[in-house]
Image (cartoon, rainbow, N blue to C red):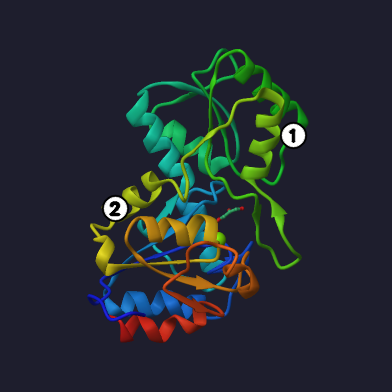
């Protein structure tokens, strides 16, 4: 990592960095322990909108990764914060799981399929043709279209999984309407994360497995960035991008010694 100010805070992506679906990646537990031991502020910043922070903590803990609920910030939470800021007490038709529906309920939104203000598309492993058809018709009738994250796929041990960005493309193709994506690389997601841990961009590092969400988010917010090759990006793909991470490592296990070295 280039000689700059000491690192005071860490933002880390989840899927492809700490876990692949429910399977912990070696070194992830040690990385979180090293962060907690160092006393550095940190946040798990995930575009995965499926789970609530409580459920996500339990899921990570099952893999030996001990992340406090308050250290989790998801694209569902960022989307709920965005809607609450934009149109308090609004209504939405939601395609997604408890992570998204709970976050919207917690900011006072009503979930409905009757002339909603917004159609909000999130991550799920059970996209239904009926729900997507309903979304298409509501958007055609004037509902504003939001999506939690632009990821086209997510990593798993068996291979890539279709994700929100790919389903959003289907809806866009059918309606001619593109969604507003709230998750990474939207600066809103990065800004809300930095504010949440009172971090400053020049003393914060972003760790991720995607160049088009994690690394560009860090770059454009003025953070140093670490790309891990344990998720959606292969080393041979990095040069195709017009920008580079500060450092490239095989996996989160290689970041553990950096936590103490850079503090
Ligand atoms: O869920 C995702 C796409 O399926 C991406 O999640 P992360 O942002 O944690 O990698
Ligand atoms: Mg990821």
Q: Nearer the viewer, residue 51 or 149?
A: 149
User: Residue 113 location, x and y as percent?
Assistant: 60, 18
Counting residues from the start of the chain, the first of labels 1 and 2 encountered is 1
The image's mark for residue 196 is 2
Q: Are marks 1 and 2 in contact (CB under 8 Å)?
A: no
Q: Nearer the viewer, residue 74 or 216?
A: 216
Q: Is residue 104 visible?
A: yes
Residue on which the image places disc 1: 128
Give left or right: position of 178 versus 162: left
State which quadrant residue 83 falls in.
top left
Q: Residue at x 32, y 86 (%)?
A: 261
Q: Nearer the viewer, residue 79 or 240?
A: 240
User: Residue 204 location, x and y as percent?
Assistant: 30, 67
Question: Alpha carbon of mark 1 to alpha carbon of mark 2: how far?
Answer: 34 Å
User: Residue 81 location, x and y as percent?
Assistant: 37, 37
Query: From the viewer's perspective, is residue 255 above or below residue 208?
Result: below
Q: Residue at x 23, y 57 (%)?
A: 198
Q: Is residue 69 visible?
A: no
The image's mark for residue 6 is none
């Amino acid at each position: 990592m280039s000689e700059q100010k000491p690192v005071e805070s860490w933002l880390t992506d989840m899927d492809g960095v700490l876990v692949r679906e429910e399977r912990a990646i070696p070194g992830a537990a040690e990385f979180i322990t090293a962060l907690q031991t160092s006393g550095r502020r940190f946040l798990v910043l995930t575009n995965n909108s499926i789970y609530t922070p409580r459920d996500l903590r339990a899921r990570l803990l099952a893999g030996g990764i001990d992340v406090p609920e308050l250290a989790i910030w998801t694209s569902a939470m960022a989307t709920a914060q965005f809607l609450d800021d934009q149109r308090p007490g609004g209504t939405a038709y939601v395609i997604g799981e408890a992570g998204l529906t709970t976050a919207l309920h917690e900011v006072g939104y009503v979930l409905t399929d009757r002339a909603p203000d917004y159609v909000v598309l999130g991550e799920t492993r059970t996209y239904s043709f009926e729900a997507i058809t309903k979304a298409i018709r509501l958007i055609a009738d004037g509902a504003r279209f939001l999506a939690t994250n632009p990821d086209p796929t997510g990593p798993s041990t068996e291979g890539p999984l279709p994700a929100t960005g790919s389903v959003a493309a289907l809806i866009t193709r059918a309606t001619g309407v593109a969604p507003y994506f709230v998750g990474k690389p939207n600066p809103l997601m990065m800004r809300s994360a930095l504010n949440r841990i009172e971090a400053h961009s020049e003393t914060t590092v972003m760790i991720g497995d995607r160049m088009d969400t994690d690394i560009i988010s860090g770059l454009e917010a003025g953070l140093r960035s670490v790309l891990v090759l344990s998720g959606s990006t292969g080393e041979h793909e990095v040069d195709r991008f017009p920008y580079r991470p500060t450092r490239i490592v095989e996996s989160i296990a290689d970041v553990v010694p950096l936590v103490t070295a850079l503090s």
